[in-house]
Amino acid sequence: MSEPLLRTEGLTRHFKVGPLMSRQTLHAVDDVDLTIGEGEIVALVGESGSGKSTIARLLALIYRPTKGEIYFRGKPVSRLRSRKERLAYSGEVPMVFQDPYSSINPAYRVSHGIMRGLKLHRTKLGRRGRREELEHVLGTVGLVPAQDVVQKYPYELSGGQRQRIGFAQALGLRPKLIVADEPVSMLDVSIRVGILNLMTELREREGVSFLYITHDVASARYIADRVLVMYAGHLVEEGPTEDVLQRPKHPYTQLLLSAVPDPKAKLGLADTIDVGEPPRVVNPTPGCRFRQRCPHRVVACEGLTPLLREIGPGRRVACHVAEPDVASAASA
Amino acid sequence: MFVVLAVFPGQIAPDDPAAEIFQPGLGASSHHLLGTTAYGQDVFSQIVWGTRQSLLIAFAVGGLATLLAVLIGVTAAYIGGTTDGVLSLVTDVILVIPIFPLVIVIAAYQKNAGFATLVIVLGALGWSYGARQLRSQTLSMRMRDFLEAARVRGERRSYIILFEILPTMTSLIVAAFLGAAVYAVLTAAGLQFIGLGDPNSQSWGTMLYWAENNEALGAGMPLWAIMPGVCVALLGAAFALLNYAFDEISNPALRPVRRIRPAAVAPLEPAAAATDPDTILEVADLSVAYATGTEPVVAVDHVDLQLARGEFLAIVGESGCGKSTLLYAISRLLNPPAEITGGSVRFHGRDLVALGESELRSIRWSELSVVMQSAMNALNPVLTVGAQMRDACKAHSDMTSAEITARSKEVLRLVSIDPIHLHSYPHQLSGGMRQRAMIAMALLFSPELIIMDEPTSALDVVAQRSLMVQIKELQKRLGFAVVFVTHDMSLVSHFSDRLMVMYAGQVVELGETRQLFDAPLHPYSGGLLEAFPSVRGPKVPLLGIPGSPPDLARPPAGCRFQPRCPVATDACLAASPPLYPVDGSLVRCVRYEQRDVA
């Protein structure tokens, strides 16, 4: 198999929490192996606190991993020493933030971030070149007429327009992989799908890969080729989107899917009332982190952390009791 | 004005302030506006020339102190860690040093210290307060996404501090500058008054010093002392005003709010209210406006709704559609600049709009309670859940302590929280538990109506679902009515009896929930339903609704949805349609006009 665009190996990030005397370790991300191919849209799904935003920040080099390594085109990212090498990486792997109201500096016109990005990363462009590129990327994300948009301050744009500015900033860097951390969750329902469509278009036209981080399974289904499910810092299930959503194997994925509000489905009120919530993973002991909420718990779940294992083509699940994915094996 | 005096002293006051050429001790006259000093100097000239020195000190010290404050405050906060620890310690130490006595000591040591020394000493001691403020502001911004965005972009730290952080803090920096300037003028005047510094320099403080030395009051020349004093006070006031002005310019939220005179609210004929004995809430023709800018912005536009005992009504719409404002208006919790400009809210036949605050208090909580969006903000972080329940009980009833405890435990059990959490503080509960605790508190007095403003939007899908199921079960058991506001239509699809869709301040559709989901009448309701993908069924490309909701300060002509509507015609531009009744639903769309006639 050829080397994927980006791959992580045992990616781990812990945070020290609590007062100085009784420091504890919060396991935000533990031992995550993931891959993202060229031109692929991968969705990373999970609840708040599951570690998905930490992964975004690890990939964007905001945090350093506690353990593990990120390989970009086969090269370990931790070996990037010089400023030039790190700049080159962050130009190829930019990030789009969740909150369009706080991710643009309110003191500048909206073109500021795009122009700075061009100046830092596209050093060959002259003044005029930058100007042209600015208008080009604004047009690409659907902000037209660009000449009017560049004059505006952030407060003059709607949430959806600001999020498009975020994508324009990323695009100006000629990226290979855009890490999009919940890019639609703060937007109004009627304009969310516009941003999702924009991501699909950018993949088609510019060949950009996406890591789409979301808590919303339905939107992941809408755009992603593959989906990764996180729970309490662990990757618990992965596979082609339709396979995972049609035949979820991990009990957590099953719970998550059953909770998605679906106006078209019938609902019995006796339906699963699960009052449990994801644990904060502080100084964890070995064992499955979902076991307290799991209806299928067995003895092994107490002391043995389940590892991801192959249960079908491209499908992996971290669960002691999950069955192999028969349907996908048969179709393959 | 002081600036003019400082820049052109020569033109305004021709007499050399130091020259002792006039007759000493003259009173005020047309030539010597404020008289002359004991040495025959012109007081007016001295004042004018003194202005120059005071302002020079003010700007020099202000500049120096602000520079230090910015450098130290912002750097400390942004870099954090040990750097922050050390710099903050220095800041705090300087903050607690009694500056004035220290300056006296330094000045006494450096006899006849000149202007430069004064500026340096005052500047070096005066930055700490501003630094503290800037540090805390920077701390609150450090994790803001645009700074992370700049870091991800690969900006250097110095660039981020200078060009990303500082421009957003101009108003604080100006405040720090003006604060330091006022302090400099006062301290300098004080120092010179007690005779430190160069007694031959031209400044207000020196004038006071000489006035004191020559016993101004005893000599019958109060102007010697009064005028410099007045000037110091005026300058201080001028700086303070400048500060306010700048704040107002840079932050529109601080501008004074004009209140809207509500149009005379026509009293509703009581006959209309008594139609159905089962109706517990009747909102009629309710309008709310925000007093911003020149024209009031109408956020809730003539809304009518009735709610029956035990009914679950969901209000759905996007941000800015007026749904939350409507809730606040119903529960009479609006704050200026928002105000009810017309209509009535009848709860059990009483018009809440006309009630005073004390009468409202007796109704709120006991008969009508409110659950807010963010439990973390609504709960008091320093009180246990039990203490907050006790406070509520004491304020709204005369229950005994034992009764209160029993009732508190009972309501917690209702929402499946272990009563042991009566002793927990809000931060010890998870998000879902906090929200359930809020609902438990709302249930304390078995109200007939609970108003909920997006109670689940801060929760994850799984917690969201379980909370919804729980609300519905409680409602079945206890029989209260619910008004539930949300932006997520699919969330309420299985829970609400009726659904009200709002757009740009108006009700656009109101009908049975199931019917509305199966066959939405208004193009906007239909658009919302089709706007977002589903986890089940075939995967279809979606278009969403083009454009974005209108600015309520300038609503579009005719139907408010018309600019985004896929089926709009010329008729939609002509006039804003009323609500038409269609098969038991109401819909604001001109396409249903004919049916109305039929």
Image: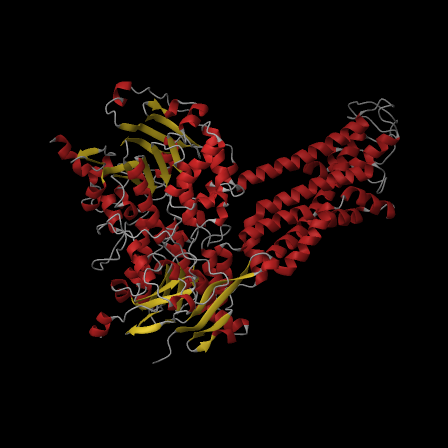
Q: Quadrant of residue A213?
A: bottom left
Please identify the residue farthest to the bottom as the structure is shown.
A1
Q: Is residue A78 visible?
A: yes
A87 horizontally vs B290: left or right: right
Q: Quadrant of residue A236?
A: bottom left
Image coordinates of residue A147 in percent, x first then y, are 40, 54
- Residue B139 versus residue A213 in the image, above or below: above
> Between A209 and B551, which is closer to the camera in this rendering?
A209
- Residue B281 versus residue B74 in the image, above or below: above
* Image quadrant containing the C terminus of chain B: top left
> Between A260 and B228, which is closer to the camera in this rendering?
A260
A117 horizontally vs B320: left or right: right
Image coordinates of residue B376 in percent, x first then y, are 47, 45
Image coordinates of residue A187 in percent, x first then y, are 36, 50
Please tell me how many numbered marks the rendered image carries. Answer: 0
Q: Quadrant of residue B320?
A: top left
Residue at 50% across, 54% down: B144
- Residue A111 versus residue B21 in the image, above or below: below
> Between B581 and A118, which is closer to the camera in this rendering?
B581
> Between B6 and B404, which is closer to the camera in this rendering?
B404
Q: Is residue A122 visible?
A: no
* Image quadrant containing the N terminus of chain B: top right
